[in-house]
Image: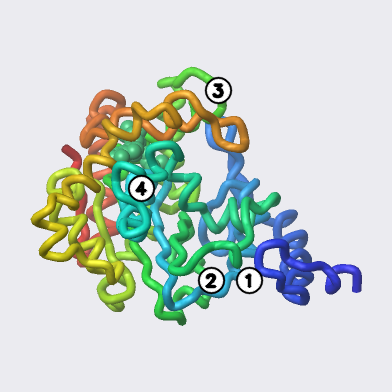
Amino acid sequence: MEKLKKTCQTCGDEERMGEGEEKMEEVLKTLPMEKLPEGIHLSFYEGHWYRSTFMHGIIPFQQHFKAQDTDLILVTFPKSGTTWLKALAFTIANRNNYPVSESPLLTTNPHSLVYFLDFEIYGKSPILKLEDLPSPRVLATHMPHSALPTSIKDSNCRVVYLCRNPLDMFISYRHFVAKFSNKPFDPSLIEESFDMFCRGVSSYGPFWDHVLEYWKASQERQNKVLFLKYEDMKEDPISHLKVLAKFMGLPFSVEEESQGVIEEVLKLCSFDNLKDLEVNTNETNRNGHPYSMFFRKAEVGDWANYLTPSMLERMNKLMEEKFAGSGLNFKFS
Ligand code: A3P
């Protein structure tokens, strides 16, 4: 009975919180686990690998979250350009509230403007209450499509998925984890991590399933799921920004286009601009991690400085096998 009296701090749901806690306690003990060479523990839950510490938010998120038709959910595989997508979507959604010269992005990191549902809003110490967010809500997650709360799939809310070629994303993650753990980047760990990644063992992995699920969803529900690639956005940011704004139901007007608003938004959210802002060079998030860890090189093809030709060959074979017949591919340079 004690459990049924508890209330979810995020959505105020009473009964289901009890069920969620029960299920979580049960499953956490029994889940298969692996440890990445960098020391991060992953748990295998319903076909996907998650950071073990995130499980406390993932299950309640799956059980409690009630999507609204007006929600925009940004989804990425970690290190695929989440920071960029959050900045762009936030700016598009709020461009009538703030002129670009007064954007909150100038003083606030994108991750403190658009929060992750699975480990921040539903995490152990919820960062905010969903009901406090103004509508339309812009929210984020790294969760695979098949693991999303049913209300996201059943409602008319929109989902934007951004992915990146797995080699650059893999290297970006290694650097991120080193910074996050306050350790120097250790290239000697790459071989083992790469093997694990190829076997599907990575945070929110297997990577292939993640990308394919959203790829298929975007083809089946074109108005509801937008599929973007980091490399394409780097190559042609203007067209992609227009596509994103249109998908969000907030297309740029002819007047805005002629006034150069698209270029302004892109400049504001660009890697070069964001990385040098005071907030992103010198400030930390609520867990004491520097915001600078989200900004490194932002290049396509940096993997070539770290991975061997045989690793590339292994990845190419895997991609051929996993993406066969899907029409999905990635640019590596
Ligand atoms: P690199 O490590 O290759 O430089 P995420 O935002 O999903 O955590 O991904 C981080 C990657 O996106 C990092 O890649 C980072 O440098 C890059 N990045 C951060 N901000 C960006 C921006 N505004 N535009 C393009 N890339 C950005």
Q: Where is residue 223 shown, x and y percent of the image?
A: 28, 76
Q: Circle 4 sits on which residue?
A: 87
Q: Which amino acid does label 1 sit on?
A: His
Q: Residues within 10 Å of mark 1 (few under 14, many from 20)?
A: many
Residue 181 x/y as whole percent: 56, 27
Quick one: SS at disc 3? loop
Amino acid residing under circle 4: Ala
Element under disc 1: helix
Q: Is residue 10 above or below residue 181?
A: below
Determine which residue is flagged by label 1: 64
Label located before the other in sequence (2 or 3): 2
**Circle 2 residue:** 149
Q: Label 4 to label 1, Cα distance in Å?
A: 27 Å
Residue at the image position 64 percent from the left and 63 percent from the top: 59
Depth-wise, is mark 2 or mark 4 nearer the camera? 4
Q: Which of 217 and 235 is in front in this view?
A: 235
Q: How crowded is mark 4: few (under 14 residues within 10 Å), some or many (20 or more)?
A: many
Separation of disc 1 and disc 3 at Cα? 34 Å
Tell me whether the residue at label 2 lies in contact with that at label 1, contact meaning CB atoms closer than 8 angstroms.
yes
Q: Label 4 to label 3, Cα distance in Å? A: 25 Å
Q: Which mark is residue 182?
A: 3
Q: Is mark 1 within 8 Å of ligand 1?
A: no
Among the two numbered marks 4 and 3 on one chain, the one whose residue lies closer to the N terminus: 4
| Disc 2 to disc 1, C-alpha distance | 8 Å
Q: Three-letter amino acid code at disc 3? A: Asn
